[in-house]
Image: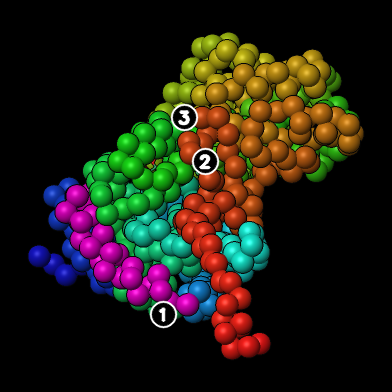
Amino acid sequence: MTQPASPSATPASDERLANWIGHAWRASTAADFTPVFNCSTGQRIAQTPLSTAADVDQAVDAAAAAFPAWSRTPVPDRAQVMFRFKQLLEAHFEALARLVTLENGKTLAEAKGDVRRGIEVIEFACGMPHLIKGESLPQVASHIDGVTTREPIGVCAGITPFNFPAMVPMWMFPLAIACGNCFILKPSEKVPLTANRLAELLAEAGLPAGVLNVVHGGRDVVEAICDHPGIVAISFVGSTRVAEQVYTRGCAAGKRVQAAGGAKNALVVMPDAEPDSTLRAVLGAAYGCAGQRCMAGSLIMGVGEAGDALNARLGEAIDQMKILPTDRHDDSDMGPVIDSAARDRLFDAIDAGQREGATLVRDGRRSIPSEGFFVGPTLFDHVQPDMAIARTELFGPVLAMQRATTLDDAIDRINTSAYGNGAVIFTTNGAAARQFAQGVNCGMVGVNVGVPAPMAMFAFSGWNRSFFGDLHVQGAEGVNFYTRQKLVLSRWDDSYSRKLGW
Ligand code: NAD
């Protein structure tokens, strides 16, 4: 068997990646591998092992062995590892962003945002000595004091999607680890390289062996994680279909599970919205990361006369966008989608939108690079609420415009969605903004903000079929998810002092 290679450098074509277990690259027991692509060219750049339950067993053994010492390590010392990790991420920032661009296809600027948002979680985790503190109430009863502490829970696992190779894994493992847990990361098989690099850097930062492990693969690894008796908690981010499966299966095995799913987010533009900043924000929300964001704006509702102006101005702005291979062009405005299956699915969705009778204003099947997995920015108008392009998460650069008559009408349409990640309003009227924020049935609202983006100090709070569980990812809820509370009630009467005659 060939020695598994370190992913530190850009991998050679066809390189077979290994799992990171106990601070060593261990060849997977996988019989099958799946390709990783440079999405801008369609060329294979590495192969991800589709690991097995035996690989998960190895990782759980390493994590369980590391847990007693790591969970007893003083919290400020655990935080120091995060401080050093943050410094290493800053030192390798550009290289990490380029790795994200290479394996995911997003533009360099978007990749930098991906890494930066992840670093913000590390910064948050550096505050663990404060975040993890409990409460106390002296004299809760006569001679009795009450103190709560938050304790780590054991071996946790994280399963992540392809669209944010740096940020989404970093929503999970820094908090879990700083809380005193050990962790097994199962990154998307489509973007394994960034995860490997993060694991190496965390080892360099001084994390003890076995505290973070990376097991590559797909469904088999996920199911083994759900069923493994040595894993106590699962964080999942991905599509709603898989989120629900992981939630159901993990809970049935007695684990705590937080599972964030897909979305269909609407952007509402009022007639009084400031035109230029609204246009910029809508373009970013709809076409940023080629529409492959769970907070992407994929529906737009022009209220009243706002619709006609949007149609014209969005079309003109799309014509100005540079759709270039992101591996060679740092100034590309939008990159490719993740693979040929995603491209073909999006082309089919555009076909279906036309068949259903929506007006195709700009067609993303035209004027795109000939190689790689490109779909150009696409705009439909006069979309009806029951059309598939209005209801289904397409996860690509396809924006569907509906015409709403009033703000109430727009809110009612949004609230028929099964999802509940985000909704956005553009207006200069505070009363309209307030009515919208209070009326929409979702967990994250933007007011003149195209993407109410994840912020490390707040939980990422999807609702409805965009989230399964109770405590959300990140923020204080993330700390609570990775810890459990202990209450210590102590009775000390004053007999000791009396005996000494004090
Ligand atoms: P996905 O659900 O296909 O994959 C997510 C993870 O689940 C991957 O690690 C994958 O290997 C695994 N997986 C895939 N199919 C599986 C199966 N049948 N059984 C068990 N595991 C399986 O998602 P994706 O395509 O990688 O990512 C895109 C999706 O993620 C979109 O729906 C997007 O909205 C969602 N997403 C949500 C959030 C959020 O915070 N709510 C953030 C990012 C992405």
Q: Amino acid at mark 2?
A: Asp
Nearer the N terminus, badge 3 or badge 1?
Answer: 1
SS assignment at label 3: helix
Query: Residue 209, can we see it?
Result: yes
**Label 3 neighbour load within 10 Å: few <14, some 14-19, many 20+:** many
In this picture, is 125 found above or below 374? below
In the image, what residue occupies the spot 64% across and 62% down? 142
Q: Position of residue 450 (x, y in %)?
A: 70, 41
- Residue span colored magenta: 50-74
452 in the magenta segment:
no
Judged by depth in the image, the label closer to the viewer, 1 or 2, is: 2
What colour scheme was applied to this rendering of the protein?
A: rainbow
Q: Amino acid at mark 3?
A: Leu
Q: Position of residue 417 (x, y in %)?
A: 59, 22
Left or right? Give the position of 441 relative to 220: right
Q: Which residue is mark 2?
A: 470
